[in-house]
Image (tube, helix red, strand yellow):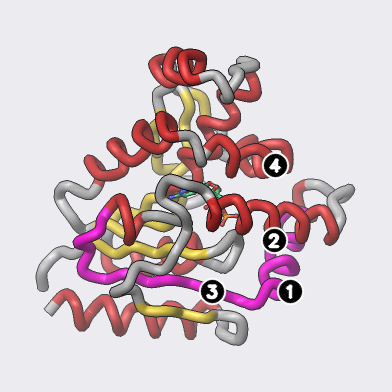
């Protein structure tokens, strides 16, 4: 079987990372959550009071940012490291979610992230999830999946996830954040979120994680022949 590149794009919180991670595990591939990179850059900008509307400030800040995924034996997942610090928990905070789509729309930020993402895929055998992976990062990927799910289902899923860590979060806050990010991600100038022409749609509103995995795995195995 040949090694391929699998891209998983779609709206906020529609199960992209779960599908991509499961697929990578089954195929013994590398899994990359590209959103974690934009979240870590946003965390750096917030912590260091970087004015991201000012291009020279952004360029200067990016020179000091080093991003790395490090496998965590305890959770069995890769954690995002920003300048040698494990920021996996912090990048999921609401304050990062509220700012990440603005930061991710900046040209210099995208160039910085996309260059690293493309390097990670040089040897293939990778599953990467995000917004522009099938359109910009790996336009020649062998399998492109575009995930969708009903907004109510997406809000409930993300609320459950966030409520476990922060009991004061409300359903409305989560819904507003998802809708705002979907809007900004779809309408930005550079690499907006859209389905690549050759991507297959996977709507998982009514699918269990195992059902969605079996569907995606079937597509992957066909492409690997
Ligand atoms: O987990 P969720 O779907 O909510 O979002 P994420 O994958 O962690 O991505 C966070 C944000 O990063 C998105 O809302 C986008 O603004 C940005 N992003 C992007 O612009 N391009 C990507 N390839 C991945 C994420």
Where is residue 30 shown, x and y percent of the image? 30, 54
Q: Nearer the viewer, mark 2 or mark 3?
A: 3
Disc nearer the start of the sequence (1/2): 1
Of mark 2 and mark 4, the one earlier in the sequence is: 4
Residue 158 is marked as 2
Dot 3 corresponds to which residue?
148
In the image, which disc is placed on residue 217? none
Q: Which residue is mark 1?
A: 152
Locate residue 20, reporting x and y percent. Answer: 41, 64
Q: CA distance from mark 2 to mark 4?
A: 14 Å
**Residue lying at 32% horizontally and 72% vertically, measured from the top left:** 197
- Give above or below for 21 relative to 89: below
Q: Position of residue 156 (x, y in %)?
A: 74, 69
Identify which residue is drawn at 49% across, 60% down: 17
- In magenta, the rendered stretch is 138-162
Query: Which is nearer the N-term, disc 2 or disc 3?
Result: 3
Image position of 13 (left or right of 16): right
Q: Nearer the viewer, residue 46 or 57?
A: 57
Report the Cα–Cα distance between label 1 and label 4: 19 Å
Q: Secondary structure at mark 1?
A: helix
The span from disc 3 to disc 4 (Cα, nearest Å) is 21 Å
The answer as to whether callout 1 falls within 8 Å of ligand 1 is: no
Q: Who is closer to the viewer here, 185 or 66? A: 185
Front: mark 2 or 4: 4
């Amino acid at each position: 079987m040949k090694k391929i590149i699998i891209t998983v794009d779609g709206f906020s919180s529609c199960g992209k990372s779960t599908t991509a991670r499961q697929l990578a595990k089954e195929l013994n591939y590398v899994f990359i959550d590209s959103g974690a990179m934009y979240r870590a850059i946003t965390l750096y900008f917030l912590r260091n009071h970087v004015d991201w509307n000012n291009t020279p400030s952004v360029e200067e800040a990016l020179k000091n940012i080093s991003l790395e995924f490090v496998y965590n034996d305890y959770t069995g997942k890769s954690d995002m490291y920003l300048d040698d610090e494990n920021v996996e928990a912090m990048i999921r905070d609401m304050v990062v979610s509220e700012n990440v789509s603005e930061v991710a729309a900046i040209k210099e930020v995208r160039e910085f992230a996309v260059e690293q993402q493309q390097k990670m895929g040089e040897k293939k055998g990778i599953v990467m999830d995000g917004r522009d992976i099938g359109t910009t990062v790996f336009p020649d990927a062998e399998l492109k999946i575009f995930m969708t799910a009903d907004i109510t289902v997406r809000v409930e899923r993300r609320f459950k996830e966030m409520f476990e860590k922060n009991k004061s979060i409300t359903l409305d806050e989560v819904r507003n954040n998802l809708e705002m990010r979907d809007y900004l991600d779809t309408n930005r100038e550079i690499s907006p979120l859209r389905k690549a022409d050759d991507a297959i749609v996977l709507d998982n509103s009514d699918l269990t994680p195992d059902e969605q995995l079996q569907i995606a795995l079937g597509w992957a195995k066909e492409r690997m022949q």
